[in-house]
Amino acid sequence: MTSPRILSFDLDDTLWPVGPVIAQAERELFLWLRELYPEAVREHSIESMRELRARVADQFPQHGHDLTFLRRQALAEQFIAAGHDESLADRALEVFFAARNRVEFYPDVRPTLRRLRDRYRLFALSNGNADLERCGIAELFDGHITARAAGAAKPDTRIFAMLLAEAGVAAHEVLHIGDDPLADVVGARRAGLQSVWLNRDAREWPSQYAPPPRIVTTLSELV
């Protein structure tokens, strides 16, 4: 492994556990809808809203990388079916995003990023729709590449190519850190980047992929 100039980080399940965050955001959105627009959820539960988004994803495969589009489109369909204007989907999305960005960082995240920031340029590289400003760590990063902006989600090489273009470096000068074996490790390797697998919970590496070049159990091990 050569010395990198850039460190790029996945966000969800790398810097914070995302499952509880999304679950809480969906609960808050559902309660908001039930209070202000009950007709929109009269035939729905949180689970059926998830199923609607899955149907929307099947209907718009060209937008499969864009989680914001899929959620907004599903909400728009809900409002239209209830006799409301679909523009209400934007208000509903804001309710969701307000909660979606109230994340609880793993304990090692902030101190490690601050130390690494002194030596490297840091970028975020995420398939999700978290907002670094709202999460409170934007000042630690030089940039944030999203699947929506790149038009492709990890492990597609296009999102890594957008990172290289924005950072102005060659692929071998970037070390990408993430929790997902395929999206983060295999995807980075296919794009020519160096990679580290963050395995916080002692998972087995998938046997169908070549072993990861480096494994850490906390971000502090990077230092």
Image (cartoon, rainbow, N blue to C red):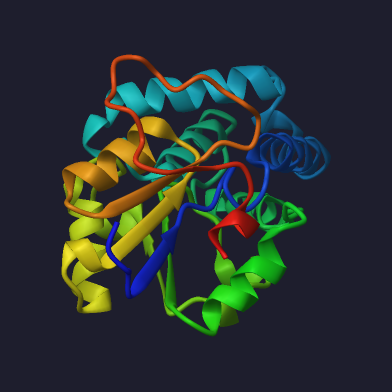
Is 134 placed left or right of 60 in the picture? right
Is 157 placed left or right of 221 in the picture? left
Vertical position of residue 2 compared to residue 92: above or below:
below
Q: Residue at x 66, y 39 (%)?
A: 22
Instruction: Give whichever of 196, 146 is nearer the camera.
Output: 196
Instruction: Give whichever of 106, 152 is nearer the camera.
Output: 106
Res. 187 in view: yes
In the rendering, at what x and y percent does residue 57 appear?
36, 28
Q: Residue at x 21, y 37 (%)?
A: 62
Q: Residue at x 78, y 42 (%)?
A: 28
Is 155 placed left or right of 79 in the picture? left
Instruction: Give whichever of 63, 134 is nearer the camera.
Output: 134
The C terminus, quarter of image: bottom right
Instruction: Give whichever of 2, 81 is nearer the camera.
Output: 2
Vertical position of residue 103 compared to residue 55: above or below:
below
In the rendering, at what x and y percent does residue 136 appear?
68, 72
Quadrant in which residue 183 is drawn: top left
Is 198 placed left or right of 30 in the picture? left
Disc tally is 0
In the rendering, at what x and y percent does residue 139 appear?
58, 82
In the rendering, at what x and y percent does residue 206 appear?
40, 18
Quadrant in which residue 190 is drawn: top left
Quadrant in which residue 210 is drawn: top left
Res. 138 in view: no
The N terminus, quarter of image: bottom left
